[in-house]
Amino acid sequence: MSNRIFRAALGGVTVLFSGLLIWSILSLVFMPERSEIVESAFSEEMIYSVKLSLLTSFLSVFIVMILAIAIGYVLARFHFPGHHLLRTIVDLPMAFPELVLGLCLLLLLGHGPLGDFLKGMGINVVFSKFAIVVAQVFTAAPYAIRVVYGTFRGISPRYELVARSLGCSHMKAFFRVSVPMARGGLFAAAVIAFARCMGCFGTVLILAGGTRMYTETLPITLYLNISYGNLAMAMTSGIILITISLGAIIVFELLNREVVL
Amino acid sequence: MDILTVKDLSVDLGEFSLRKVSFGVPEGSYCCLLGASGAGKSILLETIMGGFSPKHGKVFLRGEDVTNLPPEKRKLGIVYQDYMLFPHLDVFNNIAFGLKEKSLKKTEIHESVLDISKNLHIDGLLHRNISTLSGGEQQRVALARALITKPEILLMDEAFSALDLSSREKMRQLVRSTVRDLGITVLHVTHDSEDVWALADKVAVIHDGALLQSGTPDEVFQCPKPGYVAGLVGARNILAGTITESDHICNSTIKCKGEYFYSAGSKYMEKDQEILFSVRPEDIMVAREPMAVSSRNQMEMNIEGVEKRGPLVWLSGRKGELELHAVVTASSYEELELDINTNVVFIFKARAVQILEQDTSGIPMKAGIPDYVT
């Protein structure tokens, strides 16, 4: 009897939470009028926002993947003093609230020595479109690094040693053996990074500012329009974000089955 | 001449270390490194390969110091137990991998792959995906991939351990004939003494990161060093005794537990010296009665233990405090009508009595028998 109650309690909690989650998502999709959604989706502001989000996200994913492949490989293959510390540092932004991460970047790139140095070279990062990319990279990189690290850890270093015994340099063994063997995990990392970049809000808001039709990505559109009371625009940007995230999660799950996190 | 020389090699990996390992591998020979799991065999092999940097010591290839050379400059091939075939390439491209690095013409690569594939009977598999191959087929592809670049030495890490018995036997024959034909030196690490018997010209025993004994298989298996080596090679009948007589041509009489053993040609001993000696079970002939034969050792024993292992039967014979083990075939066991409590005679030549250690101090003993003896 106690076993049945235990199982029923577990099942109940699972069903209740899943139900609420699905209900909340469906309420976003079904509550507004369809004509309002279509009108909002093709508005100038929404088209600008989608274009900017996609452009910055693709650019950020490209940068994130270069960082993730390098750092993930170093963490998976090399043992050195401070290895655990580096892993913790790289993971830190995942634990930070996005607003705090944005503030840290604002201090670094605004009036900090690095910001002054960049300004001296004519590069103004903060409150620019470039700041969106910086914010997205710092937000998404830890997730991608984690997936890439798990992928490389799952590939025996002996494959590379065999390749090197056959005449490859370390770099060639990396590109001819390790990278092709890791392609599933690398693609999964890119997908999860893309989803994080598209949904990045707090860091972008602080570092790039939420300027309408300038640094306005989809989450900023949602935020600005909810502030103005324009519910249809906010919901449309929410639906677009959820559709992209859902697609990314499905692709990630399909590709990530063999990745050890 | 040794093609490979390892001198005082020490590797520190934190949780495990190799300790001052030294040995040589003669050119054209088949050498086995024998040891249990965790002995440090693979680390030694990968250090020779260039995968680990030694803390101390040197690796010489044809007399040249290669300790600090990267793996790609050492001209060594490696074959692993779990094959390590590249899963994103088909069989042909796995085998051709090393040749593509040498920027050979496509026709040359194709011919070389075809040649080695025919030798190893995998020419029908060239366009197959790696995941569709059996263990034996994958191992032959791994061997072809390593041999096609004509390495100076082929390193094999437990290469047959993942195979079933019949594939293992076939692979041993194939490897032996192929490396002989190509004149390639082999260093093969294994925990299986059958690999040593079937393949090796030379064997070295490694345990806990240190090399304990090396020599020909006969030397190591017939006269294992007391302790770990004796246990690893399955030595039984290792006994402690006292020399009662000895002459200048190394004939000795040994007293052990009230019985006298005659030993010939082993080592020169002083009278009254305490020693360890062994008689290999397979050197003991079992008869129902004493026989007029040239073997000088004949001992009447009572069988007190029988252990059937496939085609062989292990017998434990006892006379007073003395216990000896012998092995007979199952058919001999039936024909001689042997069983527990049967009285038999153990007959063995004086040359079968091998003196192992002239100093028994420091060897832990239990009832007059070293406590590592199984």
Image: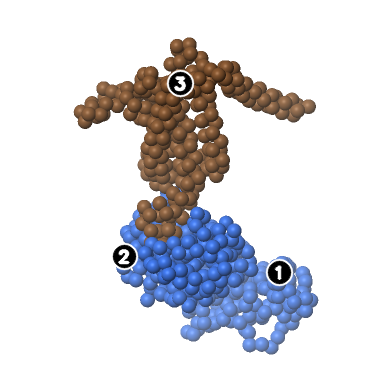
**The image quarter in which residue B341 lies:** bottom right
Q: Are marks 2 and 1 on the same chain?
A: yes
User: Judging from the image, what is the letter of the chain drawn in blue?
Assistant: B
User: Where residue B228 appears, x then y in whole percent?
Assistant: 53, 62
Cα separation, mark 3 vs mark 2, equals: 72 Å
* Camera-nearest residue between A165 and A214: A214
Which of the chains bears the disc numbered 3?
Answer: A
Where disc 1 sits, the SS reads: loop
**In the rendered image, which residue does mark 3 sit on?**
A43
User: Where residue B259 appears, x then y in whole percent?
Assistant: 64, 75
Chain A tint in image: brown
Badges 3 and 2: C-beta atoms under 8 Å apart? no
**In the rendered image, which residue does mark 2 sit on?**
B65
Mark number displayed over residue B310: 1
* Camera-nearest residue between B152 and B271: B152
Of badges 3 and 1, nearer the viewer stands 3
The amino acid marked with disc number 3 is: Ser
The amino acid marked with disc number 2 is: Asp
Cα separation, mark 2 vs mark 1, equals: 49 Å
